[in-house]
Structure formats: C-alpha cells, structure tokens
C-alpha cells in the first residue's frame, strides 16, 4: 500500500451524506417516497385470493395431462374422495399376535 498523504486518505474514507430518512422519524404505516405505486397495475388475482382460492403450480409433465383447470380440479376432487374413504376404513390400531 503506498504512503498516500493523510489528507487524501481521510477524504476517501468519509461517507457522503445521503437523503436517507431515519426509521425512527417515519410512521411505520406511511409509504416511503421511493415506493411509487401510482402507475402500477392492480393485482388481477386479488378477487380469487379474497374468495379463498389457492394457486398451485404444476410440473410441466403433470400439467400436460390436464387440458384446463376444470379438468385438474375434477381429477383432484376424485383423488381426495378416494383418500378420505381409505382413511375412514383404516383401523385405528392394530394388535400384533
């Protein structure tokens, strides 16, 4: 490391003042100016989310088996019914002889 003059070293180590707002001076419910949502699009899935729908991402090979979401839902409902019937018939405990 070269022996630079002390004044030059101190100048490069100083932090520049920024326009940061201290977190203790900002209301936690207030949106900061750097978050500008004026030109953002509304969430097109918000109504489905509010209605209680869930979004599930299928692997490509699984998605290829279903032409649309209705077919996928129908198959999953049938599978869920089979699982529920299987659980009801299963004995709660087994005795070993």
Image (spheres, rainbow, N blue to C red):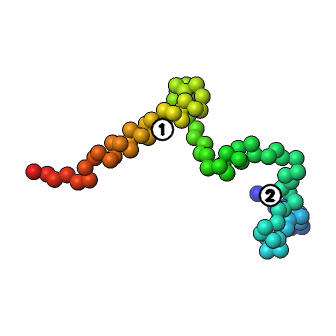
Residue bearing the label numbered 1: 77
- Which of 38/25 is in front? 38
Rendered location of residue 83, percent (x, y): 38, 41
Residue placed at 20% from the left, 52% from the top? 94
Q: Is residue 42 above or below residue 74?
A: below
Residue bearing the label numbered 2: 2
Residue 80 visible, this angle: yes
- Which of 12/32 is in front? 32
Mark 1, mark 2: which one is toward the viewer? 1
Residue placed at 82% from the left, 44% from the top? 41
Q: Is residue 2 above or below residue 61?
A: below
Rendered location of residue 91, percent (x, y): 25, 49
| Circle 1: element type | helix
Going by the image, does 21 lie left or right of 65?
Answer: right
Going by the image, does 58 lie left or right of 90?
Answer: right
Going by the image, does 70 lie left or right of 79?
Answer: right
Residue placed at 38% from the left, 38% from the top? 82
| Circle 2: element type | loop
- Which of 18/58 is in front? 58
- Which of 90/62 is in front? 90
């Amino acid at each position: 490391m070269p022996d630079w003059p002390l004044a030059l070293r101190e100048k490069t180590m100083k932090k520049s003042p920024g326009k940061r707002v201290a977190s203790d001076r900002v209301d936690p419910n207030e949106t900061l100016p750097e978050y500008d949502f004026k030109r953002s699009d509304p969430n097109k899935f918000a109504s489905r989310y509010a209605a209680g729908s869930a979004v599930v991402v299928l692997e490509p090979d699984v998605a290829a088996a279903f032409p649309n979401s209705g077919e996928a839902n129908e198959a999953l409902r049938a599978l869920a019914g089979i699982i529920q019937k299987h659980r009801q018939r299963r004995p709660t405990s087994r005795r070993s002889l």
